[in-house]
Image (spheres, helix red, strand yellow):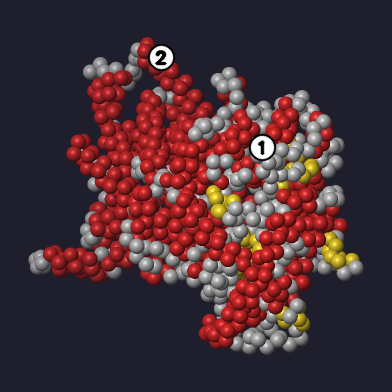
Amino acid sequence: MNAAKRKLALLLPVMTLLATLVSACGGTNNNAGSAAEPSASPGTQGSTSAPVEGSRSVGGLQVPIVADKLEFSLWSPSGGNFRGTNFNEKLSFQQMEENTNIHINFQHSTEASAEAFSLLMSSGKLPDIIYNDLWGTDSGKYGAKGALLPLEDLIDQYAPNFKKILDGHPDIRGQITSPEGHIYYLPNLVLDSQDLTQMFPQVRSDWLEKLGLPMPQTTEDWYNMLKAFREQDPNGNGKKDEIPLVTVNLENIMMLFAPAFGVEYGFFVDNGQVKYGPNDPRFKDVVVYLNRLYKEQLLDPNYLVDTTFQTLTEKVTTDVAGAWFGWSGSYMGNFTTLMEGKHDTFKIAAAVPPKGPNGDQRHVSFRWQAGAHGLAVSSKTAHPEEVMKWLDYQYSEEGILLNNFGVEGKSYDLVNGEPVYKDEVTHPTNGLTNTQELLNHTIGGGSWATVADTRYAEQIREANGQTENPLEIYKDYIDFDAKLPPVQFTAEENEIVVPLMADIQTYVAETINAQIMGRQSFDDYNKVMKQLEQMGIGEVLKQYQAAYERFKGK
Amino acid sequence: MVIKRSIPEMIFDNCNVLFLIFCSFLFLYPMWYVLVSSFSDAHAIAAGEVSFWPEGFNVDAYKLVFEDQRIWTAYGNTFIYVIAGTFINLVLTTLGAYPLSRKNLEGRSLIMAFIVFTMFFSGGLIPAYLNVRELGLYDTRWALLLPGAVSAFNLIVMRTFFQSIPDSLIESAKIDGAHDFRILLQIVLPLSMPVLAVMTLFYAVGHWNSWFPAMIYLQDRNLFPLQLILREILIQSSAQNMLAGVTQDEVFRISESIKFATIIIATVPILLIYPFLQKYFVKGVMIGALKE
Amino acid sequence: MAVPLNAAKAKSRKLPTSRSSVSLKRMMSNRYLYLMLLPTVLYFLIFEYKPMYGAVIAFKDFNPFAGVAGSPWVGFKNFEKFFESYYFFRLLKNTFLMSFYSLLFIFPASLAFALLLNELRLKKLKSFLQTVSYLPHFISLIVICGMIIDFTKPGGIINSLLLGIGFITEPIQFLILPEWFRTIYVGSGMWQSLGWNSIIYLAALSGINPSLYEAAVVDGAGRWKQLTHITLPGILPTVLILLILNVGTLLNVGWDKIILLYNPGTYVTADVISTFVYRRGVMEADYSFSAAVGLFNSIINFTLLVLANRISRKTTESSLW
């Protein structure tokens, strides 16, 4: 990790230099930008520039943003992580409307958001603001098609809060800039490096104690532990109903084990070379290992069908699941609260990433400071300036509090200047978990175009009775150099990568699953690699390498 | 006429009866299983103890489903789509079928070909979606009512029926000075009740069961039909999202029975009207397929 | 209102001058009929033909933000991409097999079911059976797939039953195993449509002149003879027409049931052209490519239909047109 940090530090000056260059370019463009505006927004004169009477400054941004109420449309999935059917039901957005004088018409899709998003984009008619999970890779693509508004100039002009963050954390700019040098979306941000860890291995530590086992350190430890879970009836009901390792998809299992064999399930970086895991000879060992788990029923035999979080929760709360790879809040915290008072010993502990037979050991489930999810602006919006200001508000101190904590006095109180959740939120009595209850009040700092507040996770975790931060232990296993950064492709590169990867991904998903389930022989793993070669993985890797080098050299 | 049955014939007849009764069991049992499961305890279902009668009889699942406002909103929407949609279907299908059934209509075979062609060829999903957006129907109830307003197949069925109405009736009305709209309303339609009944049934059931257009054309949850909510519960297993306010624990206890209860609630209206309309099916299908 | 009458009179009085003027007159006399037809024709134009024009994106590199007209032409590139695709033959094979097996099993089963029903002498039982057998047709696909998922899971009723009678010793993961997918698809399809498909045969059966049977009885023909000599020939045209229709849709497998049931584990057998189009077009936003694949599928279907119709017309004199 030390090496990684050092490399990152070396990058910083480069990034800063770049950032100044970009903003300098932006500066020269300012006039052109504002000259074009009135034509794009007929009938909004008067709302531009001059601060509204009785306005105040929020980190340099004047609110209310407009004197006469404006309405923007914003498309976003609802439900799931977002909870609720219309975001305007959340107190945070009501308060935000009051503060900014901008009303948001939320257009929500159902949960099938990949379909809904794609269809929305196919229409060519977009709402003012669009949420997407994959702007990190999609924004450049749609930006080049002319769907999205380049934001870099607008940021310089109208977004003092966001700009301040960019200037204070120079590497963020590189993470969200398209190959052509545009910024097309404002990302969710995590500024504190210890919060970058996402999912991690979690184990029923009370089962370990009961069976007298230590926390697993290596892949062999994991095998032995899971084996013991399966055979020694840790839940003590006399039935062999334990499902030692549960998951909602294969990807999570891969994140747990593949790095121990030196690879990943997708793209990763090996000494500056972009590689595709299934195309690496070492991947065979992963398959062999997982096949062993599957064959001995240590890996949930239903893992391909039980793909909802609900089914996983059921397995955990009915005391049959022994280990999984998941989030701190929605898995560990959630399960702990659900089992409170219903189980005498139920306890979950975080395990270190397993060390493989060749000593490989790293943790791959972490994010970059700029998330791939966030908000982009339609190129057709009639109010680019006001939209930008509204977006900037999300990154102001006030906006960050609203998005992370909700409305003061309703979901949190200020104690010595620090926001502290109210008891009704941390210990709800209405049958909801505290995360769910919180999301009735606000959107959640981790899912929106805003800054995720460290204090949010901390307080929820403590409310759930976890005193130490489980994420702490992964700091040492994170290798920034081995993870593929959020590279973006040019239109030409996309043209090559997208169709080839569509077939390759289908092939890999099928083949690897079949081999794990023992339905297809993996003795000759070279065959898979040969097949991938035939399907054009070499061509794909070339594009990835180019994009990666461009990213690094930026 | 009394026919004496030979012994092999009697054996065959009896076997046939038994076999067909077994078939009807196969047709009914899945629904029966769903019904008894909806009244059963979720643990009993999970343990495979439910077979013919409810185990651990309770109506908790129904209570929860009935308490859920979204189910009722969706129910109401579905009724709107079924009633308004079927009405539009019937009007447009009739207006298309009647003129095309008149033999003296110049160019009718051309227009028929124009219509029949759509049965075998279509622009595909994306163009259809773009079309709905361009027409400004997106995220409105019209998006579920107008696309698919006429089924070419049903139009053919109806036209065939109209053709069976004696020309003399229509000609004599014409001589009496009635114009075509009047003839259609006062002479043809009253004679066409069976085919109208069949069309109503076909279209109404189609609307009742439709989910995909709603999934791609609607965003506003207040417009969602029942099937879309069902999809969330049955296929995506997100019953807990539906039943906010119920503790997680509760949801797990009855989640299985909730699924079954929603199936029942969503299917009951069809099961209720169905036996009464059933006799028309044969007629409808016969008209449509045999004569064309 | 008097106009049609006048026109009719005029027509009867005058000698036909030319064909076109006669037809023009007839068109005038039918103008209310045309007016009546207008909304329906408009519907087909707007909601069926206009999207067909949209299918030209198959020959373009469609960019939604440039519009259909503004996107550049690329000729057959998208089609070539599909033909060269690694999955081309598998998709064809899966699509064909899925509907071939449906045809192979459901088609004769519906016919047999109708014939057995027809032989039934207890009228009450017959009508009860009909009612019951049509029922599944009216149950929504969502509900049916929900039931399939629930029934086939390891703790589900099918596994419990098979375990109970000792047919298997370990529960089968039906929805994960590719070799079961077609069975589940066709089996549930049979349940859904067996009764409904039989209606048409029952209708045809009821259309056979009863005097034929009476004469056969007088001649001393048994039930089997009656079946082979009167019943089957009587419904043969119906059977053939349906067969043509079915052949015409051999490469037309709906994706909705499949996308509700499949997963990467079963792609091997479950992935068909329409699901592929759905994934590529809707999930991965490759609009032009998926339009090309869809168009290809439509053309094949149409060709198959025309071929089947021609063969049938030549050999049996039954045809759709």
- Can the viewer see residue A216? yes
Name the element at disc 1: loop
Compared with C149, A272 (above or below) is below
Position of residue C106 in the picture relative to residue A127 (left or right): left
- The amino acid type of the residue labelled 1 equals Pro
Residue at figure coordinates x 29%, y 45% from the top left: C305
Q: Residue furthest top?
A: B7
Identify the image quadrant of residue B97: bottom left
Chain letter of mark 1 equals A
Chain letter of mark 2 equals B
Residue at figure coordinates x 37%, y 24% from the top left: C119
**Badge 1: residue crowd in 10 Å (few <14, some 14–19, many ≥20):** some
- Can the viewer see residue B250? no
The x and y percentages for residue C46 are: 38, 64
Name the element at disc 2: helix
The x and y percentages for residue A74 are: 61, 68
Residue at figure coordinates x 65%, y 61% from the top left: A371
User: Camera-side residue: C82 or B248?
Assistant: C82
- The amino acid type of the residue labelled 2 equals Ile
Q: Which residue is mark 1?
A: A357
Residue mark closest to the camera, 1 vs 2: 1
Label at residue C26: none
Q: CA distance from mark 1 to mark 2?
A: 71 Å
Q: State the quadrant of the C terminus of chain A.
A: bottom right
User: Camera-side residue: B12 or B103?
Assistant: B12
Label at residue B11: 2
